[in-house]
Image (spheres, helix red, strand yellow):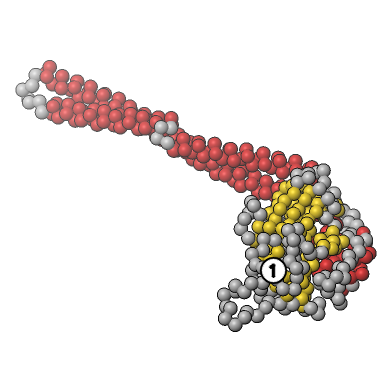
Amino acid sequence: MKIRRILATAVAVAVTTPAALLSVTPAFADAAPTAQTQAKPTLEELEKAAAEAQTAYDKALAAKTAAYQVVEDAMSDTAPLTVAAEAARKAADEAGVAKTAADQAVTDAKAALDALPETATEEERTAAEAAVTGAEATAATAADAKTAADTKAEEAADDADDARVAALRAYSLAEKDLTDALDAKTAADDALAEAREEANENQDCVAEPGLTTVLTGVPDSITAGTITALSLRVSNGTDKAMDDVAAYAFTHATDTSGLKETDRLLRLQWSTASSPKWHTIGGDHLINGIGPLKAGAHADIKLRLTIDASAPAGNGAAFVSADYTNENGSCGGNPDIAMYDFGVAKAAKPKPGKTDGTDPGKTGTTGTGTTGTGTPGGSGPSAQGTASSNPVTTGGSLASTGSSSTTPQLALASGAAVALGAAAMFTARRRRTGSRV
């Protein structure tokens, strides 16, 4: 975003030499890139690689899910091989029972043969011997059947075990494939994100005067220890939509000499209809409550400025600006920073016996929506605000701060440069899309 780099460089010079802002030229732009010894992948190639990596990851995830289901099926009691193994085991058990019975029959037949008396007839002895022979034949058959059944049961159990092992091995491989696919996807996504970021950084932001910021409710003078209600309107006066608009606000104050800064005694907060809670504007000066703006649309932001009761009398100014970024990487902003000056009146000492802060004219809220009766040292704002507004052109000359009695003495010494530098610095800050808080 070269326009911001130019501006940042100009500001750095302006803090010490305000006149340098008169000659901001492309000389501050990035130096020409050095020749590449190896061609980098194009953005289109990286997008294609990221899409392919995503497809591969999706397939790997589906394969892992399917592999897990195979494991579940293989481990189930209703798995075909498990059922077959159980049936073979039962058949082997039954064959074992049959063999045991056959063996017992042989034993019984032999016992009956041995128990024949000497008086037994030849026919009785022949029958007993035949019984032994038959029992032995049956026992042999039963033994063979048991051996076959045991073998079949063992083979069926092995088949079931092999299926479970194979399912677990396939799941393990699928899990590894998914891990590899995720690593590849992450690398492709990171490469694409880096390329897009680099493309955004190298893309020139454009000056867009049609994106305006108007601050109302700034009084001529604000008494220390009070809260002033302000209103900021950000308008998209162009014929194009802006995907993400951000406003910036900054306050600067000095004592009457113009040499001592009192910024730390000022606090600026914002609130919107979508985010009604008061948010303190931090060091990034960001007001993150706008979002997209259609062509011709505007957004209103409530502001309130609190000046600590210990603030000395002096002069102050509020600076507002806005810029935008689009999803396609294009960006821009208003090259002018609107400046609104005001005086700072020292807090009046409470009268004896007045400790509840109810003395009229010395406490309460000043500015738009005032709840007090005004502040000493100023006439108070109208509904639109009466403070003077001096656009500070950050891309050209240093604007005059005026010469009226209420204009702050920021032009004294380096005060103007410091104020301008502080205000311009936050718009010079390059913002990446999605980085706002």
- 231 in relation to 359, above or below: above
Q: Is residue 94 left or right of residue 1?
A: left
Horizontal side of residue 328 vs 360, given as left or right: right
| Picture residue at 51% right of the left edge, 41% below the top | 168
Q: Which residue is mark 1?
A: 374
User: Is 72 positioned to the left or the right of 102 in the image?
Assistant: right
The picture places residue 252, in percent across and down from the top left corner, at 76, 70
| Quadrant of the rendered image containing residue 348 | bottom right
Q: Quadrant of residue 10?
A: bottom right
Q: Amino acid at mark 1?
A: Gly
Q: Residue furthest bottom?
A: 352
Which residue is at a point 61% across and 47% down the rendered structure image?
179
Does any portion of residue 269 appear in the rendered image? Answer: no
Q: Point out residue 124 in the picture as x, y percentages from the top left corner.
A: 11, 19
- Identify the residue at horizontal 82%, vertical 62% (top origin): 389
**How many marks do you count on the picture?**
1
Quadrant position of the N terminus in the picture: bottom right
Looking at the image, residue 126 lies above or below residue 40: above
Image position of 232 with respect to 294: above or below: below
State the residue in front, 194 or 412.
Answer: 412
For residue 115, what is the image quadrant?
top left
Residues 322 and 159: in front is 322
User: In front: 402, or 14?
Assistant: 402
Res 19 seen here: yes
Q: Secondary structure at mark 1?
A: loop
